[in-house]
Structure formats: structure tokens, C-alpha cells
Image (cartoon, rainbow, N blue to C red):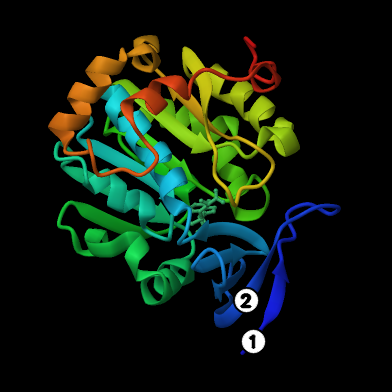
């Protein structure tokens, strides 16, 4: 086991962040990716997949709260939620915090990610793993969306790796066409779209694809300290354009009714509404930018 060594993130070839490793906890080559979990000096426990930071105990709340509470509260009455990826369990936990959610299905391709996160990052998923409303499936998200019945979910949350390797299928025309089909009338889908200062193509190209399947597309931002390079964007595609323009007082009312108000550390009604105001350098990467 490594002691007092450094781990360099390998996301970009010429720039990156590094962590001082207090203790390596797991290093596994699964059928899909290289999984590493270690204790850092600064961010608590950290998980890397193929050398890319996925989650740290220190700042996971930013990403998970924004990826979950924004779509659920924008929808306003989501009962059935499909989560793709998210093997650490953090999105599942936040989805189940919403009192109105009756069913949350999570489809993660790599069972080893789930196993290792339960063992070494138990606080991320917490009790969500055993919640009777949760169904956890080990499988490819693209297969699941192909098979899902029309109108069977209200919200889809895609918490995937970047569009390389196994995650690539989740950014395709086929994925979004199926997402539109399996969503109910006012359904919407959000997904992680990278850090546009460094990965502008990810947002630009997936926005075009979302626009082929949904009438309303956009993105919103969150400042996640360990997704380095400025704001990260969360892609948005909805059947109902009014959902991203819900007034702040109505968002607050919905959050209170859902049991979310006061339990978050990043999301607030004001941040929810403000997150759709994009800096011009990000807005210009969207088709209607
Ligand atoms: N929050 C992280 C980020 O933005 O860097 C990503 C979280 S990580 C838990 C993403 C998960 O998506 C990984 O566990 C990976 O195995 C899973 N994944 C990638 N491709 C997938 C696919 N086709 N179907 C289902 N899950 C997939």
C-alpha cells in the first residue's frame, strides 16, 4: 500500500491536479475500468476511474445535490426516477430524500464500483442501498433505456463517466431518443457534461443531440472543486420549457414539501434558479447560444 505518495489525475495530457495519498484503500482492474480509492490529506476519500477523479468525500455534495435536486424540483411531482451510472450511490441517496419519490431505479454498468464504494465510501450512498423504493441493477444504461416502457419514468439522471469508453453510449442520439420515449409527458433528463472551459465539445455536441429528441434544451452550472477548470455544466433536456423557469418562491415551496429545504450544503432555491444563467463563454457552446 502506498504511503505519502502523490496521485496525478490523468484527465488532460498537459495539465491536472494531484493529491497527496495518505493511504491506498483499493486498486482493482474491473471488466470496464481501473478503479482506485484512496484516503487523501485534503478531500477525505477519493475515487478515480481510469485515472480520472469521480468523487471525493469532501466535495461530492456539490455535484450530487445539483444533479438531483434541480431536475426533481423543476419537475415538481416526479415519482419514478431512473438513474444511469452513479455507482457510488450519492445520487440515489439524494433522489430518495424526496418524499414524493416512489421508485428509483439505478443502472450502473460496473458492479465493482458499487461493491468498492459500499466498502470504502459507505457514507456516500448511506441507507439508500437498502431503501425499499430503490432498485439497483448492474447493467449497461443503453440496454436499459432501449427496453424501458414508454412513459415509465418522470426524470432521468445520467451520472456517467466522460464520453469515452463505456460511458460513450450515454451521449448518443440513440440514448436521447430512448430517454424521450421512456419519459412521461412532462419528463426531463439531466446529465454531467464536463467542464466547458476545458471540454467545450462535450457540451456542444451533446446539446445538439439532446435538441434532436427534446423541445427544450439548456445547461446549468455548478462549481465542483475537484472537477477542475471552472464551472462544470449539467446538461438539461425537457419536454416542458416552463420547468427551467419556475420562480424561486415556487421552488422553495416544492423543496419544503419534498423535505429538501435546510438539508443541503450547496443547493438552495436561489442557486437553483441562478444556475441557469450561463456565462457567455458557456452559453455560446449551446445551439441557441
Ligand atoms: N460524478 C462522476 C463524474 O462526473 O466524474 C461520475 C460518477 S461515476 C460513479 C460514473 C459511473 O458511470 C461509473 O461508475 C461508471 O461505471 C458508470 N457508467 C459508465 N458507462 C456506463 C453505462 N454505459 N451504463 C451504466 N453505467 C455506466
Expressed as whole percent of the image width and height from the top left, the position of residue 95 reads 28, 44
| Residue annotated with mark 2 | 21
Measured Cα–Cα span from mark 2 to mark 1: 6 Å
**Residue 49 at least partly seen:** yes
Asked whether, in this view, residue 216 is left or right of residue 255, the answer is right
Residue at image location 71% in from the left, 61% down from the top: 9
Relative side of 6 to 111, left or right: right
Residue 65 position in % (x across, y down): 38, 42
Task: Name the N-terminal-most of marks 2 and 1.
Answer: 1
95 w.r.t. 240: above or below? below
Q: In the rendered image of this protein, does residue 271 appear above or below residue 131?
A: above
Rendered image: mark on residue 3? 1
Q: Which residue is depicted at the point 43% across and 59% down?
A: 87
Q: Nearer the viewer, residue 193 or 14?
A: 14
Element at label 1: loop
Badge 1, how many Cα within 10 Å: few under 14, some, many 20+? few
Residue 156 is situated, as x and y percent measured from the top left of the image, at: 38, 36
Quadrant of the rendered structure where residue 172 is?
Answer: top right
* Residue sitting at the far bottom: 1
Residue 61: x and y, percent?
41, 49
Amino acid at each position: 500500500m502506498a504511503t505519502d505518495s502523490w496521485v496525478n489525475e490523468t484527465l488532460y495530457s498537459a495539465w491536472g491536479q494531484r493529491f497527496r495519498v495518505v493511504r491506498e484503500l483499493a486498486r482493482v482492474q474491473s471488466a470496464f475500468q481501473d478503479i482506485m480509492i484512496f484516503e487523501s490529506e485534503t478531500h477525505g476519500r477519493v475515487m478515480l476511474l481510469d485515472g480520472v477523479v469521480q468523487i471525493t468525500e469532501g466535495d461530492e455534495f456539490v455535484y450530487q445535490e445539483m444533479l438531483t435536486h434541480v431536475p426533481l424540483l423543476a419537475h415538481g411531482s416526479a415519482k419514478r426516477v431512473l438513474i444511469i451510472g452513479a455507482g457510488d450511490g450519492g445520487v440515489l441517496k439524494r433522489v430518495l430524500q424526496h418524499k414524493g419519490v416512489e421508485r428509483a431505479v439505478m443502472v450502473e454498468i460496473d458492479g465493482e464500483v458499487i461493491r468498492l464504494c459500499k466498502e470504502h465510501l459507505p457514507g456516500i450512498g448511506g441507507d439508500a442501498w437498502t431503501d425499499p423504493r430503490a432498485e439497483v441493477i448492474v447493467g449497461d444504461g443503453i440496454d436499459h433505456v432501449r427496453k424501458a416502457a414508454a412513459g415509465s419514468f418522470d426524470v432521468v439522471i445520467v451520472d456517467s463517466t466522460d464520453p469515452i469508453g463505456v460511458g460513450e453510449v450515454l451521449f448518443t442520439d440513440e440514448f436521447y431518443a430512448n430517454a424521450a420515449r421512456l419519459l412521461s409527458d412532462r419528463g426531463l433528463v439531466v446529465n454531467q457534461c464536463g467542464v466547458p472551459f476545458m471540454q467545450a465539445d462535450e457540451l456542444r455536441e451533446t446539446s445538439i443531440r439532446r435538441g434532436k429528441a427534446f423541445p427544450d434544451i439548456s445547461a446549468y452550472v455548478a462549481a465542483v472543486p475537484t472537477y477542475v477548470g471552472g464551472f462544470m455544466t449539467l446538461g438539461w433536456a425537457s419536454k416542458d420549457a416552463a420547468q427551467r423557469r419556475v420562480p424561486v418562491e415556487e421552488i422553495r415551496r416544492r423543496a419544503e414539501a419534498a423535505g429538501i429545504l435546510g438539508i443541503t450544503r450547496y443547493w438552495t432555491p436561489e442557486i437553483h434558479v441562478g444556475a441557469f444563467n450561463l456565462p457567455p463563454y458557456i452559453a455560446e457552446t449551446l445551439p441557441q447560444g
